[in-house]
Image (cartoon, rainbow, N blue to C red):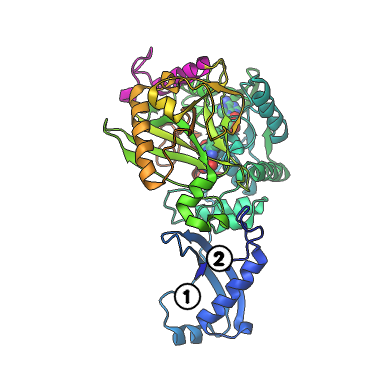
């Protein structure tokens, strides 16, 4: 079904692009009976399966819906219609039957309560395994206080920050839930429906670019944790795994906060990409790890209205804030691309180590802040990890990230370095803000970002911004606010795992983004489910 966006029942036209959902359903019903040529009373049930926006013609923007309907006399309706867009449909929900036979003497332990750890933990809890989830940071409420305190005072808690704590790195995020992965097994739907079940807005289950926002996500992760508790599992905060106990090539337990020992035969490592000290612990325990490519760069802020108008024309006033995805091949051979774009959001100081500075992006569900922001990044591979002390080590990528993060920290004494695009181009520090006011969580100050990025990255980004202006008019604006550095785009390592998702140490399951098997909230959650399946295929309770 294609519906002109102007016909939709916008709740606050021109303000935030939200539809009145019950009126939207009524509109759909009217369109469906017309399309199927059936009387109103023949329509028994409607469910939106997919909703997307077709903005190819800016003066004729449409919402495209795929819906499943239940009608009386279905076969007769289909036979009469002969419309290729109307086909029989049956839902194939995610299903999995555990078949493990080895009895576990102790509950499985999951390290990390990000999307990977939480989904793995929830599945294990629902299957009766009563898992123990260990999280070095605090619960969401305490974490919000710690993070806000950091943004206000610059006082970092190195165990609880934007990267660490309940919900993992995604808790302070834009909460985009789209993923590029192919998933014939229905796990994407399973993840989105689970989010809905634990409090997310229903529409994320069918939007082609689902988005939840940090405000909603905070409640969802809390509800998931409570469910794990109610099923007999435990989520323990302020509980950092500081060592692994290995006996005869098998995991035998973990050490928490350097004192308490907890025995286990199954250990899931859902650590995230920033658990640098724990990566060191894994190396020390001889887990097989390889370095991998990731990307670094900076974040750019533009007026959201400019982006939305460029994407949607004048209809932008009634539509949700627009996003973008841009790529460019630079003359120096580097690919530069936009990443983790946050419509109507904030740039956030998302550091997790003392004297090192990292930025990222975050938004609320409404995405109603004035600026759009996006990372502009360039891939780096282990061959680029030069000019550091140990370029050939497994953790060379970490050392490389840290080098630029430390320079970013030093540039403005721990405040987020900010620079206008024109000054970045001229390789000089800015001295005043232009037409775009930075919207940054955490203190900021002027600095020359070219001093904290490799020159080949800065050159590629400059060239990329010029090229992006051809796709989004106004993208190259001298007043565009840049901030940096953006270095935590994905994991700098991969913890090797076999076909049964186990590491070289029996019973240890590397999982999620930090282990190198996911990129983003949804794919990390999916990997959590995959690891649960691998465990439940081997073990029982
Ligand atoms: P994480 O979420 O990183 O979770 C790992 C957890 O393990 C952490 O809570 C950490 O404290 C804990 N941990 C680590 N070591 C130990 C230890 N030794 N003991 C106990 N606990 C430990 N992705 C999207 O898809 N959409 C977005 O819009 C988006 N925006 C983002 C915005 C920001 C500001 C950030 C920082 C990230 C964003 N991401 C986004 C990325 C996304 O958050 C990650 O891809 C995702 O969280 C990875 O999930 P994970 O479970 O693998 O790891």
In this rendering, is residue 248 above or below 107? above
Mark 1: C-beta under 8 Å from nearest atom of ligand 1: no
In this rendering, is residue 428 above or below 134? above
Label 1: which residue?
A: 88
Inter-mark Cα distance, 1 to 2: 30 Å
Classified by dominant secondary structure, the portion drawn in magenta counts as: helix
Q: Residues within 10 Å of mark 2 (few under 14, many from 20)?
A: some
Pick the front one: 342 or 291 = 342
Pick the front one: 292 or 55 = 55
Q: Residue at x 47, y 16 (%)?
A: 407
Locate residue 1, reporting x and y percent.
Answer: 49, 71
What stretch of residues is rendered in magenta? 382-411
The mark found on residue 287 in the picture is: none
Q: Is residue 388 magenta?
A: yes
Label 2: which residue?
A: 6
Locate residue 447, reporting x and y percent.
Answer: 49, 20
Q: Quadrant of the C terminus?
A: top right
Q: Residues within 10 Å of mark 1 (few under 14, many from 20)?
A: few
Pick the front one: 448 or 232 = 448
Q: Residue at x 56, y 56 (%)?
A: 319
Q: Residue at x 49, y 41 (%)?
A: 341
Q: Are marks 1 and 2 in contact (CB under 8 Å)?
A: no
Horizontal side of 455 relative to 540 (left or right) equals left
Give the total of numbered labels. 2
Q: Residue at x 55, y 50 (%)?
A: 321
Pick the front one: 334 or 55 = 55
Mark 1 residue element: loop
């Amino acid at each position: 079904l294609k519906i002109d966006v102007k016909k939709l029942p916008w709740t606050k036209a021109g303000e935030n692009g939200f539809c009145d959902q019950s009126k939207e359903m009524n509109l759909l019903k009217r369109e469906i009976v017309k399309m199927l040529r059936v009387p109103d009373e023949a329509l028994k049930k409607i469910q939106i399966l997919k909703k997307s926006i077709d903005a190819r013609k800016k003066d004729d923007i449409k919402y495209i819906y795929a819906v499943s309907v239940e009608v009386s006399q279905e076969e007769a309706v289909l036979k009469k219609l002969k419309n290729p867009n109307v086909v029989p449909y049956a839902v194939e929900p995610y299903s999995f039957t555990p078949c493990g036979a080895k009895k576990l003497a102790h509950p499985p332990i999951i390290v990390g309560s990000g999307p990977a750890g939480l989904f793995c933990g929830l599945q294990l809890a629902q299957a009766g395994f009563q898992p123990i989830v260990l999280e070095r940071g605090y619960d969401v409420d305490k974490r919000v206080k710690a993070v806000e305190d950091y943004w206000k005072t610059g006082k970092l808690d190195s165990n609880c920050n934007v990267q660490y704590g309940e919900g993992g790195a995604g808790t302070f995020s834009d909460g985009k839930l789209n993923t590029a992965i192919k998933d014939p097994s229905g796990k994407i739907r399973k993840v989105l429906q689970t989010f809905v079940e634990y409090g997310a807005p229903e529409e994320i289950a069918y939007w082609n670019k689902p988005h939840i926002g940090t405000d909603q996500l905070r409640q969802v992760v809390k509800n998931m944790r409570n469910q794990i508790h109610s099923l007999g599992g435990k989520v323990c905060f302020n509980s950092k795994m500081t060592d692994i106990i290995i006996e005869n090539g098998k995991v035998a337990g973990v050490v928490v906060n350097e004192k308490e020992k907890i025995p286990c035969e199954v250990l899931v490592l859902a650590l995230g990409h920033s658990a640098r000290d724990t990566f060191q612990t894994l190396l020390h325990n001889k887990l097989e790890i390889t370095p991998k490519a990731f990307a670094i760069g900076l974040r750019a802020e533009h007026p959201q209205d400019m982006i939305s108008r460029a994407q949607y024309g004048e209809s932008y006033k009634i539509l949700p804030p627009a996003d973008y995805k841009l790529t460019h091949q630079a003359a120096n051979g580097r690919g530069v691309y936009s990443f983790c774009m946050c419509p109507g959001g904030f740039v956030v100081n998302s550091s997790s180590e003392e004297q090192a500075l990292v930025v990222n992006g975050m938004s609320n569900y409404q995405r109603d802040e004035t600026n759009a922001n996006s990372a502009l990044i360039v891939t780096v591979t282990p061959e680029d990890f030069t000019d550091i002390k140990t370029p050939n080590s497994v953790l060379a990528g970490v050392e490389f990230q840290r080098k630029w993060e430390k320079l970013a920290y030093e540039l403005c004494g721990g405040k987020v370095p900010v620079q206008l695009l024109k000054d970045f181009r001229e390789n000089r520090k800015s001295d005043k803000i232009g037409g775009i006011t930075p919207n940054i969580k955490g203190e900021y100050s002027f600095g020359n970002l070219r001093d904290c990025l490799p020159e080949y990255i800065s050159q590629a980004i400059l060239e990329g911004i010029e090229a992006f202006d051809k796709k989004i008019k106004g993208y190259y604006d001298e007043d565009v606010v840049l901030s940096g550095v953006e270095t935590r785009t994905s994991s700098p390592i991969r913890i090797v795992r076999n076909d049964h998702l186990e590491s070289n140490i029996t019973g240890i399951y590397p999982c999620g983004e930090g282990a190198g098997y996911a990129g983003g909230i949804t794919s990390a959650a999916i990997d959590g489910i995959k690891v649960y399946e691998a465990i439940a295929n081997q073990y029982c309770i």
